[in-house]
Image: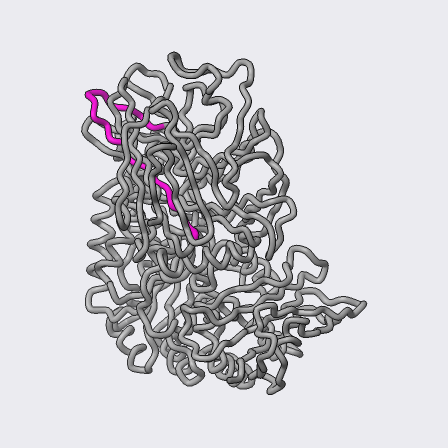
Amino acid sequence: MAITFDTSLKRFLLKTKNSEYAFSIVYDKFLKHDFYGKNKEEIKVPYYSFSPYVENSDPWYSLADNMSEFAFFGSGDFRCSSLRMRGKNGDSCTYFEYRGYEIFDGRKNIPGIPFSRAQEDTETLAVELFDDLNQCKLTLYYTVFPEYDIISRYFTIENMGECEVKLEKAMCINLDLPGHSYDMLSLYGLHPYERSVQRVPLFHGNQRVMSRRGASSHQMNPFIAILDRDATENNGEVFGFNFVYSGCFLDEVEVDHAGNTRVGIGLGDENFAYTVEPGRCFNSPEAIMIYSSNGLGEMSRKMHAFIRAAIVPKEVFAQRPVVLNTWEACYFDINEEILLGFAKEGIQYGMDMLVMDDGWFGKRNNERAGLGDWYTNLEKLPDGLRNFACKVKETGMKFGIWIEPEMVNPDSDLYRAHPDWCLVCKGRKGSLSREQLVLDLCNPEVLEYLKKTFRQTFADVPIDYIKWDFNRHLSEVGSPYLPPKQQDEVFYRFQLGVYELYDWFIHEYPNVMIENCSGGGGRYDLAMMALSTQIWTSDNTLGPDRVKIQYGSSIAYPAYVMSCHVSDPELHEGFLERLKYKYHVALGGMLGYELNILKTKQEIKDEIKSQIVFYRKVEDLIKRGDLYRLISPFENEQEISAYYYKTSSETSEKNERILLSFLQNKGTREKKEILLQVAVSEKDAIYMDEISGEEFKGSELITGIAITTSEKNEFSKMWLFTKKE
C-alpha cells in the first residue's frame, strides 16, 4: 500500500517508489509534519520565548515553532500561512482541529478545474479537520502516484454553518523542511524570452515567485525547486513543486526564526478571495510535489513521465502533425488562393497540416479590429470556411485554425453590441493591451454566446487542430455581472470560465487536437497541458534564444508538450547551414514550420523534406524518451547547450537509441574540445551513429564524444546512436 496509518504513533506514512512522506496527529488536534524524502530523522524543535501555545496542551508545544502540515493564519503560527478565512465574527483568525481520515484507491475529481488522472497504483488520503466556531469542514487530500514519486495535494472547504465565510488565502501545499542550506530554482522571463533559469540561495525571511497577471505568465512560471546547495544534474536532494492552474499563483518560501524552511504553493492572498455561502463548498486546484535524491536531472525525468502519463490528453493522431503555420509567412494578409498554394506545396515536402492563423474572421485585417467576431471573412474565403477547409483536406493536408475566445477588440461588432461584457472596474475605463479588452468569463451569458457562435461558425467544418491564443494579461479586473461583494473573486471565477470553455471545445470536438498559446509561452502550465496536447513554447523562433527557452522549459516540462517551429532562415549566404541549425534547435520538441513556402528556394524545400524524414525516425524518441542534460546554455560564454534523449519504456523503439544534440549560440576565438559523456550507454555494447555511419563502443560514449567549439555563431551537431544487437 502507498498510504498507511500507524495507530500507535498516530502517524500517516505516504510511500512512493523512492521517497517517504510522514505526518502525525498531535494532542488529537494538530497535524505535525515529520519528514519528506529519504531522511527519517524526526526534527527536534526547541521552545522559543514569545511562542503561543493552546490552553490545556503542552506549554512546550507551540504552532509557532513546530513543523506544521497545514498552517492557519492568526492562530499562533507567525510564519507564512496556508489558509486564511474570515469567519462569521468578521476576523480572519483561522483554526481547524483534526477529526478523522479516509484512505481510498484512485482519487477525488476536482469540479471545474483540471487535475492529474489517476493511474493503476494511485491512492488518496483524505484528512478531515473542523472549525467549530464557523461550522466549516476542511478536507486535505493527498494523492500518491508511487511510480513517479509524485504526491499531489488539494483541499475542500464545506460551509456547514448558517453564516458565509470568506477565503482570503488558499495554499494547496505547505511543506516544512529542516534547515535552510538550500537553493531555490525558478523559471523567470518575459515575452518573448520565457523560462530562463534562476538559482539563488535561500535567506532568512520570505521569498516569493508569483503572478498577478490573471495568467501563469511569461514572467514567472509556477514551477520551483528547492535544492541542496551542492546539488547538480546528477547528485543531491531536490524537492520540486508545481501548480495545476493557469491564473494568478503564489510560490512562497520562508526561512523562519529557527532557521527552518517553509514552502507554500497555491492561490496566494493578493489576487484571490472566495466567499463560501452556507451549504456550499470550495474546491482548491491541485499542486504537486516530487522528491529526488539524485539531482535535478532525475527530478525532471520523473516529472516528464508523470506529465505524459497523468496530465496531457491522449493523442488525437498516431503521429504529431508537422504543421505549416501561416503567421510568420502572411500575418493578417491571407486569402484562399495563397493558403491553398501553401497546402499543395507543403504536402509535397512532408508537411501534414496547414494551420490558418489570425486574420480569417470578421474585419480582421490588423490587430486593431474584428477580434470577437467569430464569423468567416468572405472577402478572404469567398466560398466560406467549410468549403475552404475541404479544399485543404483534398490536397492531403490536415486543417488547423487559430482562435482567441477570451478577447475582444473595441472595434468589433461584439463590443458595439455588448460593451458590458468586458472585464472592467465600475467607474473606471479599461486599459488596452495589444488593442484588446478581455471578455468577462464570470458571466454565463458570455460563455453561452461564445459556445453558440463557434458551434455555428465551425458547423460541418472538418477541423483537425485548433491553436488557442491568449494575447494579453488582465487589468481593471472587475466583473459587471458579479455583485460588489464578489468583485475580489473575479480573478478566480474568470479562470473557471476559461476552463469551462476549454471543456466545451474538448467535448464538442473530441477528435480535434488543441495547441495552447499565449503570445507563445504565457500559459505554460500544467492545467493548460491537461487541456491541450502541446503548447507553442514561445513567439520567439530565433535559434539562439530558443536554445535557452527550451532548455529552461525542460527542467519542469517534457518535449512531449513543446511545440517548436523552424522559421524562415533569412535567405542569404549560408542559408542552408542556418536552416540546419534552426532545425537542430527545433528537435528539442515537436516539429513545425513558419515560412512562405511559395517563395522559398528549392534547396530549402528539399532540405525541409529530408528534415521531416529524419524527424519521423526520432519523433517517438524525443516525445517519450528520457532526457539527460549535459551542458546548460546559462552557464557558459558560448551559450552551449548539450543534451540527449534515450529510449525509455514508454517508447515504441525495439532497440535502444540515443539522440545527442550539441548547440552553440556564440562563436569563440579560442577553440576548445568538449567531451559529451553519454553515461547511460552500456559499456560493452556497440553503437552505430545513423547519421555518419560511425561505430562506437559503449565505453567510448561513457568517456565522451569529443567535439571542438566553432568560431561561427549558431553551430550545431547531432548524433543518433542505435545499439547493435
Q: Is residue 717 above or below residue 128?
A: below
To which quarter of the image does residue 155 belong?
top left
Image x and y of residue 625, in percent: 47, 68
Residue farthest toward the right in the current orientation of the protein? 670
Magenta stretch contains residue 319: no
Q: Is residue 567 above or below residue 133?
A: below
Which is more toward the observer, 402 or 660? 660
Which is more toward the observer, 179 or 216? 179
Residue at x-position 45% and y-position 74%: 619
Magenta stretch contains residue 159: yes
Which is more toward the observer, 105 or 164? 105
To which quarter of the image does residue 671 belong?
bottom right
Q: Main secondary structure of the magenta part?
A: strand
Residue at x-position 63% and y-position 78%: 577
Residue at x-position 72% and y-position 71%: 712
To which quarter of the image does residue 708 belong?
bottom right
Image x and y of residue 148, in percent: 42, 55
Is residue 543 rendered to the left or right of residue 117? right
Region rendered in magenta: 149-167
Which is more toward the observer, 220 or 674? 674
